[in-house]
Image (cartoon, helix red, strand yellow):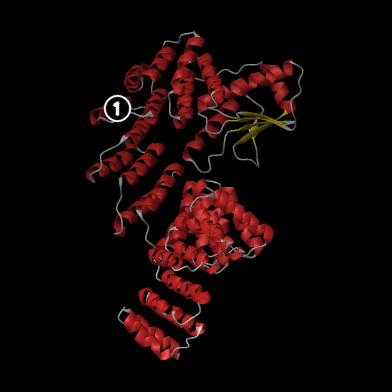
């Protein structure tokens, strides 16, 4: 039941916004208006403009020392209606009338700024407190952790957070969520997990926002296992996933190539009627392209076209064309390319690169040249990846067709063309070759260097110029294109070949065997175990080629390395077996052509 004072508040909210009408309503209180009654009336009002008129009335009835209380209650009203500009004007009026703000005044202004999504204003008000002789209490300082995190001021956010932990302040869930988001956006994913663990240690219960920002960070970090664990904890805590939850989880699984988990989330979203936008669809297609999930991609593509909420875009077609290209499915790739064209999308360099890769893998030189000419006709500039795929095609086709593709490469990238001419003519000037190759790599995009170096070494192996292959490998190691290929410990020496092409891996093996032989010749003892890591190809389709080729080559060499039963992609040999084998064959291993 409404009290007489709340009824007065309602009357004030609806009356004409004039001092006369407000006074007429409040005169029923008599001349001796109590401070408590004024606060109750102002606190019950929802119209800030009329509330300000009521404040002016109450100031005439209540002692000046209490005026700040009236203004603070009215500031809360501006906060409730999210009118920060009005709150600032009211604060200015306070100062003009000689009313000194207190801690509650600043706390209200700061929370109003946060609620109105102007965190930089909250920072401004927090930092001006000392100039008014006000010091923040622990609760206000704790709330500023979120504000500083939101504005990206990591130093201040962490300074307050460290104080909070040291002085045992209460830190609410919002502050923890803000810190997790701040660390996630800056790429400091370990700190995201540290803050989450702090929450659990301090007994603060994460809410849905906390879980969503944490899952989003794990998605950006490609940390699918952590995302899975966090999601299970969220479900166990009785929270239901929302669209952002599913989107973040799907991102984590897709980026980490956890195809089974990603498909499970996708199907659950469909079952629960969650809309899947084109960005999420394209994440799924990109994952399918990388792990070779053709049937799943086809099913998702048909779902997308029939869902009615979004349509395939150029990235959709690019991913599917790339998938068929990687699998060597030429007819399916061409059908998807034609559908893309019929849908009104012109091919870009990404799509044309996929076509070149597929045709090159299939040794279809005419089609590779045709695509190159199409790129030129469209006026599209060939980038590093396109040139790299031309080079890959050249490493696949018969040697008599090299000249045609070398001509295309010469037009697309003269530096690369110059290196190729040197290889094709089988010149012996190692110093000159290394100089040209160095200039090429220094001018090549960082994400293309390894693939280009791989292809050039493959071509060297095919052209039977092993010295140039070793030059390229050595240059790759010097430039850190290949990093940490060899490692040594007291228990094991290892050769790490993951993400190397077959030719590059075999060249690295040849160099490693030479190093092992030299170690034996110098009287050095080999460790108990020698290992070769080719990668296991679990998540990327392209990673499956090397382990298979390498196993075959090791058998051809009659090498004592055998598949490890408990370590996928590893080939192991004991020191005794390796020593005997090395001594029987010498220090070199011929590269296959």
x, y percent for residue 273: 38, 65
Residue 292 seen in this snapshot: yes
- Horizontal side of 348 relative to 58 (left or right) equals left
Vertical relation: 475 (above or below) 565: above
x, y percent for residue 243: 43, 61
x, y percent for residue 480: 55, 27
Vertical relation: 79 (above or below) 485: below
* Nearest the eye: 151 or 467: 151
| The quarter of the displayed image where residue 229 is located | bottom right
- Few, some or many C-alpha atoms within 10 Å of disc 1 (few <14, some 14-19, many ≥20)? many
**Residue at x 34%, y 79% (from the top left corner):** 19
- Horizontal side of 104 relative to 300 (left or right) equals right
* Nearest the eye: 92 or 9: 92
**Residue at x 65%, y 42% (from the top left corner):** 566
Vertical relation: 519 (above or below) 330: above
Q: Which residue is mark 1?
A: 372
Quadrant location, the N terminus: bottom left
x, y percent for residue 586: 66, 15
- Horizontal side of 48 relative to 261 (left or right) equals left
Residue 177 seen in this snapshot: no
Element type where label 1 sits in the image:
helix
| Count of numbered circles in the view | 1
* Nearest the eye: 245 or 521: 245
| The quarter of the displayed image where residue 8 is located | bottom left
């Amino acid at each position: 039941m409404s009290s007489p004072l709340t009824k007065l508040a309602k009357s004030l909210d609806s009356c004409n916004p004039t001092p006369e009408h407000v006074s007429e309503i409040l005169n029923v209180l008599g001349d001796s208006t109590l401070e408590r009654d004024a606060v109750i009336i102002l606190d019950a009002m929802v119209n800030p403009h009329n509330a300000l008129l009521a404040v002016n009335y109450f100031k005439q009835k209540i002692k000046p020392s209490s005026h700040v209380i009236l203004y603070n209650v009215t500031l809360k009203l501006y906060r409730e209606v999210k009118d920060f500009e009005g709150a600032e004007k009211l604060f200015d009026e306070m100062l003009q009338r000689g009313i000194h703000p207190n801690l509650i005044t600043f706390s209200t202004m700061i929370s109003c700024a946060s609620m109105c999504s102007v965190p930089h204003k909250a920072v401004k008000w927090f930092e001006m407190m000392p100039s008014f002789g006000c010091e923040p209490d622990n609760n206000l300082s704790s709330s500023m952790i979120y504000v500083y995190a939101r504005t990206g001021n990591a130093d201040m956010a962490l300074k307050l957070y460290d104080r909070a932990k040291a002085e045992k302040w209460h830190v609410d869930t919002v502050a923890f969520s803000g810190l997790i988001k701040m660390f996630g956006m800056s790429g400091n994913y370990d700190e995201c997990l540290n803050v989450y663990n702090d929450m659990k240690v301090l007994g603060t219960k994460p809410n849905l926002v906390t879980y969503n920002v944490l899952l989003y960070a794990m998605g950006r970090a490609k940390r699918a296992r952590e995302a899975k664990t966090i999601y299970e904890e969220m479900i166990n805590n009785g929270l239901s996933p929302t669209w952002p939850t599913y989107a973040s989880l799907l991102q984590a699984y897709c980026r980490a190539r956890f195809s089974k988990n990603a498909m499970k989330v996708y199907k659950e979203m469909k079952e629960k009627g969650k809309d899947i936008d084109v960005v999420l669809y394209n994440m799924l297609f990109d994952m399918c392209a990388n792990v070779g999930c053709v049937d799943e991609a086809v099913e998702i593509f048909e779902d997308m076209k029939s869902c009615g909420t979004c349509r395939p875009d150029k990235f959709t077609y690019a991913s599917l064309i790339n998938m068929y290209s990687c699998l060597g499915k030429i007819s399916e790739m061409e059908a998807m390319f034609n559908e893309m064209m019929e849908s009104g999308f012109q091919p870009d360099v990404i799509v044309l690169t996929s076509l070149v890769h597929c045709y090159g893998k299939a040794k279809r030189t005419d089609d590779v040249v045709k695509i190159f000419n199409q790129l030129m006709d469209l006026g599209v500039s060939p980038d590093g990846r396109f040139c790299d795929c031309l080079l890959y095609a050249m490493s696949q086709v018969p040697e008599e067709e090299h000249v045609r593709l070398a001509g295309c490469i010469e037009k697309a990238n003269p530096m690369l063309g110059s290196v190729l001419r040197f290889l094709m003519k089988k010149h012996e000037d190692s110093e000159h070759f290394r100089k040209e190759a160095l200039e090429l790599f220094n001018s090549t995009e960082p994400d293309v260097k390894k693939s280009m170096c791989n292809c050039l070494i493959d071509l060297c192996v095919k052209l039977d110029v092993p010295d140039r292959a070793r030059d390229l490998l050595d240059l790759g190691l010097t430039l850190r294109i290949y990093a940490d290929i060899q490692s040594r410990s007291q228990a094991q020496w290892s050769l790490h070949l993951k993400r190397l092409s077959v030719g590059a891996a075999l060249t690295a093996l040849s160099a490693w065997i030479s190093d092992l032989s030299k170690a034996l010749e110098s009287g050095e003892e080999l460790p108990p175990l020698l290992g070769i890591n080719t990668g296991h190809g679990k998540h990327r389709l392209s990673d499956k080629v090397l382990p298979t080729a390498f196993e075959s080559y090791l058998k051809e060499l009659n090498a004592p390395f055998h598949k490890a039963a408990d370590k996928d992609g590893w080939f192991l040999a004991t020191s005794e077996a390796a020593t005997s084998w090395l001594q029987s064959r010498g220090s070199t291993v011929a590269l296959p052509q």
